[in-house]
Image (tube, rainbow, N blue to C red):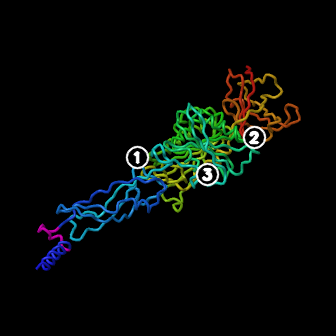
Amino acid sequence: MKRIGILFIALVLALALVVPSVAYGNGPVYITGVTPVPPITVDWLVPYEDVIAALPSTTTITCSDDIDRTVDLTWVSIADSEHPEFTYNPMSSSYLGYVATATFELPPGVSQPEPPIPLEVTTRVRQMTSLLPGIYPGVTLLTLAFPGFNEPGTYVQATMEIAGADRTYYYYVPTAYDGSEPVPLLVVLHGGGSCGMAELLRADGKAEECGFIVVCPDYSTDILIPYVSGIIDAMAATYNIDARRVYAAGISMGGSSTAALVLALSDKIAAAGLVSGGSSVLLDVPLPRPMTVVMTGGSKERVILPIDRNQVPGMLATAEWLVEQYDCDPDPVLTEWDDPAVDPRTSITRYAWSGGIYGTEVVVYAIWNGGHCWPGGLQYAVPSEIGWVSQHIDALDQMWPFLEKQRMPIQVDIDIKAGSDTNPINLRSKGVVPVAILTTEDFDATEVDTGTVRFGPGLARPVGYSVEDVDYDGDLDMVLRFRTQETGIQADDTSATLTGVSFIDGAFFGSDAIVIVP
């Protein structure tokens, strides 16, 4: 009898497992809910497989009989919440979190209600990055041992005391540098919450390719001007830097900071590039000196929150302001990038105004549907937080040819009305004013690009020129002629200035005294 009793109990238990819907006489058992899975946080560069392993393998479901049941989870995707086609990328962080989705099967004897409940669960996977230490505190910063720093030149980490604290900056010296010839210096400024090493990771390859030194500081805006000025001086003291070819570029806060350098360090910065920020800083503000400015920005930029910001109208407004100041050709040359095979999500229009004072140019790259990022660079965060990174161009590849052409202007000798001691100007004259650019030991006036020359406040362009030795020193000089009525010289002016570009020496200017006569 004891054996029969045990068999009976086993049979009852077996039936309960196979047909639980009739257990306790309560009728069918339905799923009523799914227990949420807590979010997880992973570090930058964690592989997809490791993220899957870090997610829970089970959860519980609630049922109509008030008994929770454990179900096995199969994680099927980790993707951007707004753009599910953008799946988890170890190099693309998410401050708000990727959405991870898992499916499961109902246990035996548990049925779907009407309407059915989706047999899935979602949670957030927040990925922190060492590229944004200000946003992700406590994350280990990049080090120069990171495998991405793989160019064959020399990487250096240095410090400088500014405002009572040691500040860190990083730079890269290309293999071509041997100290025998001066080389350009590019200062690249990071965005808010980022770090200088992130910008070095972006620019070292271009520095190696083109032979310039790139320096990327960790900075805050309150010490920007003295810090960057000090870095330029320190680099010039250590390396053979071409002081006439120091450039600045930056993204986001770094773009705004670069614009600040344009205004504050025009005696050191020859040209500048602004990416995703900074154009408004230059709008309606007279620049101390004409210089080439390249602006890049997207029409759908985001900074964490899903709010689109269109940078294009502001860049074009600033460009119009600069073009007028620089006396550039009024009609820009347009170039398009819109191959969907390269990038199906964005397209680019470049507006390039040339022919300004000192040969300056104003350039705008409008990234249509582009996000808050460096075109051609890393999709460093999910599109729902920063927008799409355009892959049609690389911003530095495009920017550098415009920057490297510019040099700080040098002063040359000019002689207004050569042969006259007083240089008299009759403002009512309908004739021309001759101005000689003199050849000296350091400057060959015959190499002047006459199409770039401007004279006087009116920025008069020459109506003719000749090459002759006006000072009888045996060297040929350049004599240009300007219509008096176009010079813009006023009755109380005591001097006039001429600007231009030499094919050999780049930008130059010269001034000479004048006397206004009846």
Highlighted range, magenta: 18-28
Which residue carries the number 1 mark?
305
Which residue carries the number 2 mark?
505
Residue 393: horizontal and vertical position, in percent?
57, 54
Residue 279: horizontal and vertical position, in percent?
53, 40
Image quadrant where residue 491 sits: top right
- The stretch drawn in magenta includes residue 22: yes
Mark 2 Cα-neighbour bin, 10 Å: few <14, some 14–19, many ≥20:
some
Which residue carries the number 3 mark?
397
Name the residue: 56% across, 46% down.
197
Between residue 21 and residue 120, name the one nearer to us.
21
What is the CA distance from the residue labelled 3 to the residue labelled 1?
29 Å
Q: Quadrant of the C terminus?
A: top right
Image quadrant where residue 336 sits: bottom right
- Select label 2 or label 1 by which is in front: 1
Q: Quadrant of the N terminus?
A: bottom left
Q: In the displayed structure, would residue 77 be above or below residue 365?
A: below
- The stretch drawn in magenta includes residue 300: no
